[in-house]
Amino acid sequence: MKKKIFAGLLTLSLLVLGACGQQEETAATSTSSTAEENGEVTIYLTRHGETMFNDLNKVQGWSDTPLTEEGEEVAVDLGKGLAKEDVNFQSVYSSDMKRSVDTAEAVLDGLGEDNEEVHEMKGLREAGSGQFEGESLDTIDEKQAKEAGYDSYDEYEDDKRKTDEDEWSWLANAHYYADQSGYAEGADKVQERMTEAIEKIAAKQNEEGGGNVLIVSHGMSINVMLADMTDKYKGDSLENASVTKIHYQNGDMEVESIGDTSYLEEGEE
């Protein structure tokens, strides 16, 4: 009788061990499959099309003026140029500002993919310029200097240049330090939230198998982020609807190109 009980227990133990081994093998296969599904992500980071304040040469920041007719056209041209290169997107993101969302939708229209959803993210918005928003770029310098406690803009500029900041980070900080409203953002904050947003988008797409992602953001914010991201950055102004291409794979980001306008040229043909 004892032998039968022992034999039964031995058989049960073997069955349990076999089931555990099968579960471990299944889990390992699942993990391996997930790792294989993770793929490289290519980000097409785009500045929005021309706006009314761009045309009027005014500081824009969080002030959300509409795209001009030319701004809409250039965004559609970008979509057409991307279509000629057989570029399609697995996901599309923009800042939560209307000029950015409208640009993304116009690009998709040019691509012939206007049914694609545009996901809005606050972290992608332009640097806030506080009380200086809406000011003419031709007259703002002296006002900034005065608010910051300097006698002249030259004195202000000379003092700030000692920080060795890139042009766009310096400009963001110039607004920030002189602003009395509390709404302006410093370069560090802009860089942090932009990078965090881009990494979050890329990681999500990476987990979903990789592919191309269109992201529409803003000139100063993109510049400030790039200045801290790559040695390829030279500080040049980004044209409206230009493309900065970034590759992402399992936590690593590499900038391929900055401010590319070749897609626009193809779309205009």
Image (cartoon, rainbow, N blue to C red):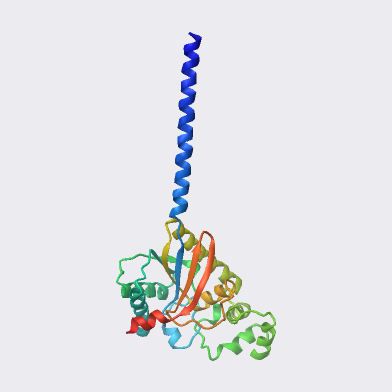
Q: Which residue lies furthest to the top in this view?
A: 1
In the rendered image of this protein, does residue 217 appear above or below residue 70? Answer: above
Going by the image, does 266 lie left or right of 54?
left
Rendered image quadrant of residue 49: bottom left
Name the quadrant containing residue 22.
Answer: top left
Task: Judge whether 214 appears above or below 76 on screen.
Answer: above
Q: Where is residue 45 in the image (x, y as percent from the top left)?
A: 46, 72
Closest to the observer, 254 or 51: 254
Q: What residue sits 30% from the left and 66% below the top?
A: 115
- State which quarter of the image contains the C terminus: bottom left
The answer to whether residue 33 is visible is yes
Q: Which residue is drawn at 48% across and 34% down?
A: 21
Q: Which of 106 and 253 is in front in this view?
A: 253
Quarter where residue 132 is shown: bottom right
Figure check: 1 above or below 181: above
Horizontal and vertical percent for residue 230?
A: 57, 73
Residue 183 visible in rendering: no
Give the percent coordinates (x, y) of residue 139. 55, 91
